[in-house]
Image: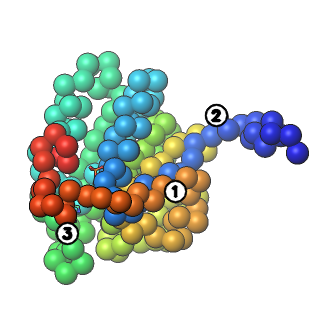
Amino acid sequence: MKKDELVNPNFDKLGYIQIYTGNGKGKTTASLGLALRALGRGWKVLIVLFTKGGSDYGELFAFREFSPKIKKHIKIIQAGLDRIVYSNNINTKDKEVVRKGWEEAQKAAASHEYQLIILDEANIAIDLNLISVEEMKNFLINKPKELEIVLTGRRANPEIIELAHLVSNIEPIKHYWDIGVQARKGIEY
Ligand code: ATP
Ligand code: MG
């Protein structure tokens, strides 16, 4: 078979499912880079930040300063409380806020208004059973054909990996946590 025969004739009219997972640094920032690139092409972008509350994120400050023209194209939904959730400290408030963000994401997809939807830390929300695997699978299978969806976060679910078209597993060859460097403004948040 010639190389050209491998090219899907509709590849640029379709949206794909991408996953950024693994224990290395670069999952959320990869998705933010994609958002920036898509906005530069005039796409409409939705970012849902699961398990992230509070406002002390550099990206939120950056988006706020965008030109009115670009700002019109981006919506950010925070679907988390201002603390880190683990399997042993989840409460009903966490569940409610994730559920609300998840419902908004589904509505946004169904509206056909967006070309890119980023579900940041959705892998974690699934891992903590705040979003069920079945619901996510259903959402991904039935997404509008032209919509690109990005899921980030550690411990991506194998059934979701199965459905995705692109999966990057970011592994830390080195990480400065190991020499005592904690999260820094401008670099990690
Ligand atoms: P980035 O947002 O820089 O792309 P990421 O999305 O790949 O990173 P996450 O797994 O989402 O990384 O981690 C989010 C944040 O949690 C990190 O920026 C850091 O502040 C904190 N964190 C993650 N792993 C550790 C660790 N081993 N020790 C200390 N803090 C950590
Ligand atoms: Mg992240």
Relative image position of residue 178 (x, y in whole percent):
19, 64
Q: Of the numbered discs in the image, which one, if any, rests on residue 113? A: none
Q: Which residue is mark 1?
A: 167
Asked whether mark 1 lies closer than 8 Å to ligand 1, one says: no
The local secondary structure at tag 3 comes to loop
> On the picture, is 98 further left or further right than 38?
left
Q: Amino acid at mark 3?
A: Val
Residue indicated by mark 2 = 12
Residue furthest bottom as drawn: 88
> In this rendering, which labeled residue sits more in front, label 1 or label 2?
1
The quadrant where residue 180 appears: bottom left
Cα distance between the residues tagged 1 and 3: 24 Å
First reached walking from the N terminus: tag 1 or tag 2: 2
Residue annotated with mark 3: 85
Relative depth, front residue between 122 and 7: 7
- Label 2 CB-ligand 1 distance < 8 A: no
Alpha carbons under labels 1 and 2: distance apart: 19 Å
Kind of residue at disc 1: Val
Seen at 41% across and 57% down, the residue is: 170
> Looking at the rendering, in which quadrant would you find the N terminus?
top right
At 51% from the left edge and 71% from the top edge, which residue is drawn?
A: 158
Residue 178 against residue 111 in the figure, above or below: below
Left or right: 87 in relation to 3: left
In the picture, residue 46 is in which quadrant? top left
| Dot 3 or dot 2, earlier in sequence | 2
Crowd around label 1: few <14 · some 14–19 · many ≥20 (10 Å): some
Residue that extends furthest to the right in the rendered view of this protein: 1
Could one spot residue 107 in this view of the protein? Answer: no
Q: Which type of secondary structure does the marked residue at label 2 adopt?
A: helix
- Position in image of residue 42 (x %, y %): 44, 23
Which is in the foreground here, disc 1 or disc 3? Answer: 1
Q: Are marks 3 and 2 in contact (CB under 8 Å)?
A: no
